[in-house]
Image (cartoon, rainbow, N blue to C red):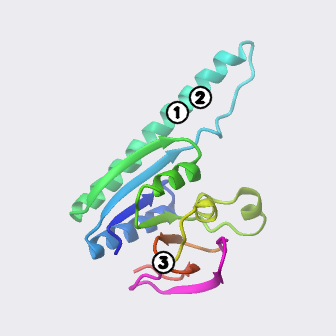
């Protein structure tokens, strides 16, 4: 059922928990994983100086190099973990807006997306959002599916666009002919 798995990785603790789940899902379904990480350089601080253009170019170049190095490290670590379990693994490293790149990649025939979420709530969620929330909210692909072996609590059922509720550990987004659900992860096994 879930043969092609897209796993979005960012190095956070939530992503590390989702990593274990992605590997278990691939083992259970005899699937393959494509791990994607996206370096976001929009945070790069731009120093003010005499020649702002040169400084801006240098700052962006440094940020891109830093993000590329971090991406390679994350993907290599995950690749080793997946290969230990005899999982076929592909890796993708991109620079850009994380949720945009993940959504674009997800439209290439994947059966499921596994993505970590920090579970922002309240004002932080309103102001900042999260990559997982954006992926679910703006993806053109329906989201749902409860996995065996995990205790999932349904929070809300929507008939239209999906909004994420807070306190999610990670999201399982799968494609098929189901209604849209939001699940709260209460336990990982």
Give residue 11's position: percent from left, percent from top. Answer: 48, 54
Q: Quadrant of residue 96?
A: top right
Give the alpha-carbon distance from disc 3 to disc 1, as whole Å. Answer: 39 Å
Q: Is residue 45 left or right of residue 21?
A: right
**Other-residue count near label 3 (Cα within 10 Å), few / some / many at <14 / 14–19 / ≥20:** few
* C-alpha separation, residue under disc 1 versus residue under disc 2: 6 Å
- Regarding mark 3 in the picture, which secondary structure is present there? loop
The residue beneath circle 1 is 64
Q: Quadrant of the C terminus?
A: bottom left
Foreground pick, 103 / 63: 103
Residue at image point 39% right, 55% down? 35
Q: Which residue is mark 3?
A: 177
Residue to which mark 2 is pinned: 60
From this view, report whether residue 120 is shown above or below residue 99: below
Residues shaded magenta: 145-165
Quadrant holding the N terminus: bottom left
């Amino acid at each position: 059922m879930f043969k092609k798995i897209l796993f979005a990785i960012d190095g956070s603790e939530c992503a590390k928990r989702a990593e274990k789940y992605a590997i278990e899902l691939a083992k259970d379904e005899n699937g393959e994983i494509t791990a994607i990480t996206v370096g976001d350089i929009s945070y790069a601080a731009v120093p003010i100086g005499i020649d702002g253009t040169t400084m801006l170019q240098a700052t962006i170049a440094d940020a891109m190099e830093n993000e590329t190095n971090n991406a390679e490290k994350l993907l290599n670590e995950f690749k080793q973990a997946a290969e230990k379990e005899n999982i076929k693994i592909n890796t993708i490293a991109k620079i850009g807006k994380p949720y945009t790149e993940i959504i674009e990649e997800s439209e290439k025939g994947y059966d499921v997306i596994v993505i970590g979420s920090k579970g922002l709530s309240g004002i932080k969620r309103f102001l900042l959002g999260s990559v997982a929330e954006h992926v679910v909210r703006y993806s053109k692909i329906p989201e749902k599916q409860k996995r065996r072996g995990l205790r999932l609590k349904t929070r809300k059922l929507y008939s239209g666009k999906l909004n994420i509720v807070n306190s999610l550990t990670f999201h399982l987004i799968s494609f098929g002919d189901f209604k849209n659900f939001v699940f709260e992860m209460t336990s990982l096994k």
